[in-house]
Image: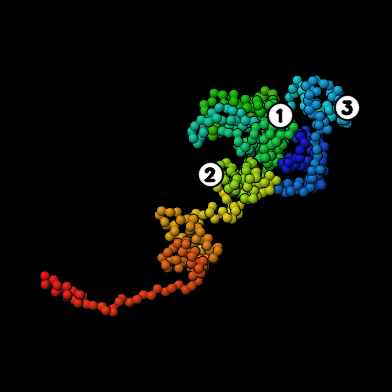
Amino acid sequence: MSERRLNRMDIRELVLQIRSERRDRQIQRDTGIDRRTVKRYREWAQGQGLLEGPMPDQEALQALVDRTLKDKDLPQNQSSVEGYRVAISQWIKEEVEVCAMWNRLRERGFAGSYSSVLRFVRTIDPVLPDIVGRIERKPGEEAQVDFGYVGLMLDPKSGERRKTWAFVMVLSWSRHVYVEFVFDQKVETWLRCHRNALEFFQGVPERIVVDNLKAAITQAIWDDPQVQYAYRECAEHYRFRIAPCRPATPEHKGKVENGVGYVQGNFMGGRTPTSLTQANQDVLVWCNSTAGLRIHGTTKEKPLERFEQVEKARLKPLPATAYDIAIWKKAKLHRDCYVVFEGSYYSAPFRLVGQKLLICAGSRQVRLFTEKYELVATHERAQKPGERLTHPDHLPKEILPGLLLDRENCREDAQAVGPATLQVVEALLADPVVDRLPTAGKLVRLSKRFGAERLEAACQRALLFGDPTYKTAKGILTQGTDQEPVPIPVELPPATTFARQPAEIVGPLAEVSSWN
């Protein structure tokens, strides 16, 4: 394993393997971690009480690691010959013998052993035998999984033909097989197929051999493969170990490679394209009949009978609840205080703008973590792309009102102040030409500065004077006239002074008319 501090997922996986009472050499063989490193972490875990009782959650484990593991205490796996890598690489090209290399290094002050130099040379220029060996596993010990392209099937939603892959899981001892057809190889598809396969077998093998597809392995390095976060959680939930193949060596999972070929040639051979739904119903019958009852070419027995009679009882029981598929992804928190996941937007505290956050998306919730696994936000999962989920306290106070303002909540806030305020807001929102929503929002927010009672009084006064505007209401509050008594309108009787009869006016006019 290359020199580096084990990350939180590595440490958690290592502690889980130690808790299962496996020996250091066994753990080294399965994980590639040097047994001396395993021993040191075993001593640390024992000292922290991690070998008994329930495992701490992600945040608690990270806090414990940060608090108790110092850099000087961390196991180092760098070879003592590493500093001479350039020289040794050149000598390998020149076909210098290892013994001669050791002597030349000793002349340069190297104090290590011949074995150290030999091991280092083998890491640069490994000597591989030309022979191959067939490895058989015990019942319940191993399953192998892979995707294989199988052609086109009908999408039940659109009715169009789409590229289709077969997810295949084969139990290594019995050769019993599970098959499911899918339209993609996304992480969530990979995890869902695992869940369905383990439920089909009604049990869990000790380990699952996988190829280096991105849904499982984010970085395909033989001595230190980086496993997808979500796949790690799935493995922890079902208590199986992940065993990645060496890159570009499909023969390391030959049982499932043959299984994929058998699906392509037998189930799919000459088959008329059907819908994905129908194919998945048919293939489950095929797994328990054609595939399960054939005489296998290697075992010379029927896979279904081997499974039912022996291997099924050797599988570990399924957990009480099915795995809630969780997808992990890194994303940057943008300047608008949102991260983007599958086309939807989720808010996080503005203090983290510009940082990378870890997104853990389950079927119902989306959780956001810092890179130190500090939980900073929890949202319900969006139901469609483009949906925006916001916690108001994630946004700066100065921009919050404008971002969350709409006509409905503006009316609700105005109604909470009083009927006069609501009437003024309705008058502003009723403008047929200009959008007065920002102005109405500013009017309602005056209650935070002057108080709801004074704002209501100011709006009453503005309505009385026939001027229901923001400017008038604010002027009344600023001048303090809202606290003065409202003037009572005086109604005067009809004018009676100097009233004249109609005849007095019409009479002279009649006389003038008669003269003419």
| Up/down of 285 relative to 485, above or below | above
Residue at 68% over, 26% down:
248
Which residue does the numbered mark 1 point to in the structure image? 246
Q: Identity of the amino acid at label 1? A: Arg
Quadrant assignment, res 514: bottom left
Q: Identity of the amino acid at label 2? A: Gly
Q: CA distance from mark 2 to mark 1?
A: 40 Å
Which residue does the numbered mark 2 point to in the structure image? 386
Residue 61 lies left or right of residue 434; in this view the side is right
Residue at 80% over, 20% down:
95
Q: Nearer the viewer, mark 2 or mark 1?
A: 2
Looking at marks 1 and 3 on the same chain, the residue that comes earlier in the sequence is marked by 3
- Locate the C terminus by quadrant: bottom left
Which label was assigned to residue 107? 3
Crowding near pointer 3: few (<14 within 10 Å), some, many (20+)?
few
Residue at 11% over, 72% down:
515
In the structure shown, which secondary structural element does the residue marked by tag 1 occupy?
Answer: loop
In the structure shown, which secondary structural element does the residue marked by tag 2 occupy?
Answer: loop
- Locate the N terminus by quadrant: top right
